[in-house]
Image: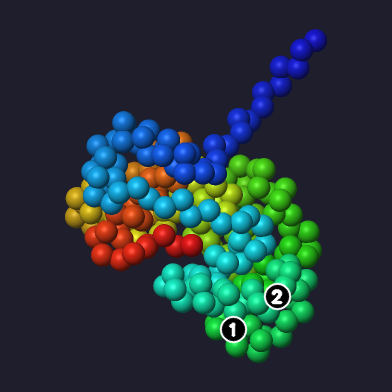
Amino acid sequence: MANTKSRTPAPRIIAAESDLREGVRALRRRCAVMRRVHDAAGDPPLRRRPPGFEGLARIVVGQQLSVASAAAIWERTAALCRPFEPSALLALEDRQLAGAGLSRPKIRTLRAVAAACADGLDLSRLARRSEEEIHAALTEVTGIGPWTADVYIMFCLGRADGWAPGDLALQVAAQQAFALAERPGPEEMLALAERWRPWRAVAARLLWAYYAALKEKRSAVPV
């Protein structure tokens, strides 16, 4: 007898520029706002990062920093920890990590992530789960909030339908794109983004590029 058990469809992945272009075309066809955003901002960057402990750590290091500052601090941090593995990071002293430019909260978060991985958080296995399951597992780690989990899902795992409703730049860009009287909060951002499934991560890239164009910055993408 044939196995009729239903299988969860494999998630759509943005792995290359061609995947990104496919998403942009789909959004342009279905959404006039995305057409205007793309016309104003141009093609967004791919910006893939490695999955796993290193990718997650890099997001933590770069939070609330300029792209240049984040890159410099990451380079110094990575130089202390070769190979970049949980056990190697846990072996470092706080003063060494602080010397690389990391704040105390980021040191605590990096140690919490490293300890969770050492204690059994399998990021490779987690990558095969749904976005909701990945998000829930990551935010159980001390210091990992919704934004960090969202960015990891989009840029390290390449999930095409990832979304970061709490990102300030996305909120500002959406307010401008939709001519809203007030900046939308996370719940409204979730509602706005429903029209962009299954390409919400491409919509996010377009809105980050749009925000950068509005602010005349080189990049607003958070990784």
Instruction: Give the residue displayed 30% in from the left and 66% down from the top.
Output: 217
Q: Which residue is mark 1?
A: 100
- Three-letter code for the amino acid on which mark 1 is drawn: Ala
For this rendering, which residue is in front, 180 or 220? 220
Instruction: Give the residue displayed 19% in from the left and 50% down from the top.
Output: 179
- Three-letter code for the amino acid on which mark 2 is drawn: Cys
Q: Would you call the spot at circle 1 few (<14 residues within 10 Å), some (14-19), or many (20 or more)?
A: some
For this rendering, which residue is in front, 186 or 208? 208
For this rendering, which residue is in front, 172 or 38? 38
**Left or right for 204, reference 10:** left
Residue 164 picture quarter: bottom left
In the image, residue 43 sits, relative to residue 113, either above or below, namely above
- Mark number for residue 113? none
Q: Which residue is mark 2?
A: 81
Q: Quadrant of the N terminus?
A: top right
Mark 2 secondary-structure assignment: loop
